Amino acid sequence: MSATVHPIGGAARVPSLDPMIQLVAADLNHVNAVILARMQSDVALIPELAGHLIAGGGKRMRPMLTLACARLLDYQGSRHHKLAAAVEFIHTATLLHDDVVDGSGLRRGKRTANIIWGNPASVLVGDFLFSRSFELMVEDGSLKVLRILSRASSVIAEGEVDQLTAQRRVETGEDHYLEIISAKTAALFAAACRIAAVVAEREEPVERALDSYGRNLGIAFQLIDDAIDYASDAQTMGKGVGDDFRDGKPTLPVILAYARGSEADRAFWRAAMAGDRASDADLADAILRLRDTGALDDTFERARLYGQRAIDALGPFPAGRAKAALVEAVEFAISRAY
Amino acid sequence: MSATVHPIGGAARVPSLDPMIQLVAADLNHVNAVILARMQSDVALIPELAGHLIAGGGKRMRPMLTLACARLLDYQGSRHHKLAAAVEFIHTATLLHDDVVDGSGLRRGKRTANIIWGNPASVLVGDFLFSRSFELMVEDGSLKVLRILSRASSVIAEGEVDQLTAQRRVETGEDHYLEIISAKTAALFAAACRIAAVVAEREEPVERALDSYGRNLGIAFQLIDDAIDYASDAQTMGKGVGDDFRDGKPTLPVILAYARGSEADRAFWRAAMAGDRASDADLADAILRLRDTGALDDTFERARLYGQRAIDALGPFPAGRAKAALVEAVEFAISRAY
C-alpha cells in the first residue's frame, strides 16, 4: 500500500507541506511577527532561550493549521494571527518542558535549551511562554477560544504525566497508548484547527469537523514519529534515533511487537524497556524484531488509517486550494518514513 | 521598634492570622472543595502528587486574601470560590516548579514532591495545575480576571528567570532585587486581592487600592522570608535554614551586608555566593556578618515599611471585621521573625 492516500497531481508526486506553506505564507509572516514581539522581555535570558527554539527550524505546523483552516472557511479577518502565535507558544512551552522531562540533548538537529542553559531556565521560560499564550488569548477576547485552549493545555499535561507513568512499562496496551498520544499530541492539533471555526464564527458542526481533522492528523503524526524513531537515522529525525528505545517508552511499534512476539521477544522487550538493553547493538536487534513481527509496517498502516480519517473529516468542505493543502499536509505527515 | 504597626487590641498581643482565618472560614471550605474536585484526574499520579503539596499544610494565604478582600467589599456572591482556587493552583504550580529549579528537598517541613516523585513529574503536574487554573477562570467567564491573572503569571515567570540570572551574582543591587520579588512573589498577592474588586464589580480605584495592599504585603512577606532564612531554624521555617545562602541567592540581607561591608566582608560574600563557602560554619559566619552590618535588622525594617504601605492602602475602606483582619494579616507577616 502506498503512503499516499487519494493521490493528488499524479501518483508519482511526493506529498509535501509546500502547498500549505504557500497558502498561509503572508499570514505566517504576521504570526511570526507576533511571536517575535511577544517573546520579548526585559529579562534577557527569556528571548535568548525562547528564540533558540522558536527560531530554530520548527515547521510551525500547528499555527499553519490554524491559518489554513481559517482559509478553508474563507475567514477575512486577522484575529487568527495572535491566536496562532498563542498555539505556537503553548507548543514551545511543552517542548521546553518535554526536553527537561526526557533529559533530551538534541532536537531538530540542534542542542536543546536544557543542555545549553540548564533545566531550571527551560522550566521557567516554558512557564513564561505558556502564560504569554494566555495573555494573547485574553487580548483576542473570545471565551470560547480560551475554553478550547485551556482545556487542551490541561489534557496535554495529563497526557504527558500519563506517558511518564507508562514509561518502562512494556505491558502498556494499544488503547492506553492511543489515549496518551491523543492527549499529549493530538489535543493541540485539534484545538489549533477548531479555533479557526470560532474566529470565523461558524456553527458547531464546523468546529467539530475541524477538531476531528486536527485530532486524527495529530495521532497519525505521532505514530509516524514513533515509527521513525526505529526506522530512520538522526539526520531525518532531527533528534537522536532510538531515543524512545533508550528512554524505555513503550510506543506503538514496541506494544505491537510485544503483543505478537515469542517468549524470547517478550523477554527482550521487558529487558529493553527496563533499561537493561540500551546499546546500539540492542537497538539494531530491536529494529529487526520490529520488522519481523510486522510491528513497524502496522504502525505506519494505523497512521495511514488515522490520516484517512482526517481527510474524510474535510469531506463537507468545498474543494479548493485550502482543502487541497490540508489534504496534502496529511499525506505529507504519513509519508515521512522509509 | 516593635514589629507591630498600629497595634490592635493591646500592645502585648501577638499578631496572628486567626482573625482572617475566622473571617473566611466558611468561604475557605468552599474553596477547598473546588481545589480537591479540580485537582482530580484519571491519571492517578496527578491527584497523588498535587495532594501532597496542596493538602500538605499550606496556609492558603493567597486564596484567603481573595476571600477577605471580597468580604471587605461586602461581596455576597460565590464567584470568588472558583477564582480563589485558581489563584491557589497558580501558586502550587509555581511551588512545584520552584522546588525543581532550586533542587529543594524540604518544604513546610515535608519532603518535596520532586524528591518523592522526581523532577519530571513535578514539572508536568505543575503544568497541569497551571492549565487547570485557567480552566477555572474561563468557567467564571470574566475577561478582566483572566487578564489580571494571565498577566500576573507572566510576571511571576519573568521574576523567576530574573532571579535565576541574578543567582550567584553578589553585585545584584537593592532595586534590582526589589524588582525580582515584586514579580516573583508580590504579583500574585496583588492579583489575588485585585480580583476581589472585579467580582464585586467595584470601580478602578478600588481595584488599585487592593492591588497595592496585596503587592506591598507580598514584598514584606518575601523580605521577612529572606531574613528568616538567616535568622531562624528549620522548624520555624518549615524549610532548611540557610537554603538561600547555599544556593547563592543574593537576597536583601546579603545585598545590604555586601554594600556596607569591609573588603574582607565583600570577599566573604563573593566566595559565599559563588558557592565556595557553604558549610554550617560558613553559614554561622554569614549570620554574624549580617548582624554586625545591621543587614538583618534593616531587612526587617524595610519589610515593616512595605507592611505599613499595605495597611495605608486600606485607608479608604470602612472599618470593620474584614479590614481589621487584613491589617492584622500584615502585622502577622512582618512579626514572623526572632
Image (cartoon, coloured by chain):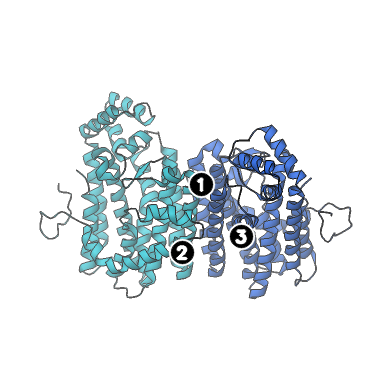
Chain colours: A cyan, B blue
Question: Would residue A137 appear left or right of B84 to someone viewing this image?
Answer: left
Position above or below: B50 against B178: above
Q: What residue is shown with label 1?
A: B125
Q: Give the labeled residue for mark 3.
A: B187
Whole-number angstrom distance, CA of label 3 to CA of label 2: 22 Å
Give the residue at the far front of this rendering. Answer: B263
The C terminus of chain A - image quarter:
top left
Foreground residue, A172 or A16? A16
The chain letter under disc 1 is B
Query: Quick check: B198 above or below B83?
Result: below
The span from disc 2 to disc 1 (Cα, nearest Å) is 20 Å
Question: Is B215 placed left or right of B158 in the picture?
Answer: right
- Kind of residue at disc 3: Ala
How far from the left and from the top, in percent, is residue B150? 53, 62
- Report the chain holding disc 3: B
Asked whether residue B236 appears in the rendered view, the answer is: no
Name the one closer to the observer, B116 or B168.
B168
Looking at the picture, how far across and down is residue B114, in whole percent?
Answer: 54, 39
Quadrant hosting residue A261: top left
| Tag 3 and tag 2 share a subunit | no
Residue at label 2?
A146
Amino acid, disc 2: Leu
- B262 on left or right of A264: right
Q: Find residue A236 and report its horizontal and vertical position in percent.
A: 24, 45
| Category of crowding for the residue at label 3, using alpha-carbon neighbours closer than 10 angstroms: few (below 14), some (14–19), many (at least 20) | many
